[in-house]
Image: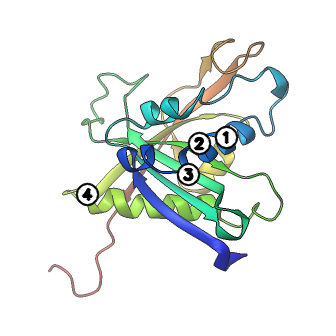
Amino acid sequence: MATSLLLRVLTTQELAADKSLVPLVNMINNVYGRGLEGVEDLIDRYSGSDALLDDLGTEGLCAFMLDTSQNLRPVAVVGAKRWKGYRNRGNPYDNGGDWEIGPAASDGDPQYRKKGLVDQCLEALYTRLLAGEQAGTVRLRMTVLEDVNAPYWRRKGYEQDGERWVIPRGRWHKLFEYTVIDMVKEISVIPSPGMGT
């Protein structure tokens, strides 16, 4: 299977013109509620292609994997967009250059699970983000479900940033509210031996 996977990284504008856009949105919506109670009343993550593009914004990036042996089926995706500082407006540590990771999803089919596909998408995004950063450091942020997703992201080096907070009923789910936390991680260019002084 490994040889049948194609990793792509596109800007929002490139994604808008790409035939993978609609299948990506469908895959994200299909796996969005995995592991949650009452999935039948879950509100779609994206109402359509335009919603994903709007979420990524004009500076956004999207890394995704397609299975070339399955008619270019999307099997993993990670997006990066400028951090809007939803809860941290005025945070002295946010210089306006932070990025938010999301969406992040992988196909639920067992042949794609536990293969590090999201990790590969993340690494591709990290490389692109660092290549465009003059300072050599990028701060990444995300908002995750505290009990469901936070342990996974902690293993990836993200740390909780601030107190937990609640997504009210009706925003993500018709019946439930969710406790979430913001997480943060800094990545840097690792100098090659012999670079610099």
Q: Are marks 2 and 3 in contact (CB under 8 Å)?
A: yes
Where does the image place residue 3, in percent across and percent down from the top left?
Answer: 65, 79
Element carrying mark 2: helix
Tell me the CA gap for discs 1 and 2.
6 Å
Viewed as shown, does residue 70 lie left or right of 196?
Answer: right
Tell me the CA gap for discs 2 and 4.
28 Å
* Numbered circle sitting on residue 26: 1
Where, by quadrant of the figure, is residue 112 drawn?
bottom right
Residue at the spot of label 3: 20
Where does the image place residue 186, in percent across and percent down from the top left?
Answer: 39, 52
* Numbered circle sitting on residue 22: 2
Element carrying mark 4: loop
Q: Residue at x 81, y 38 (%)?
A: 35
Residue at the spot of label 4: 132
Viewed as shown, does residue 53 lie left or right of 93?
Answer: right
Quarter of the image that includes the C terminus: bottom left
Q: Identify which amino acid the numbered label 3 is placed on.
A: Ser
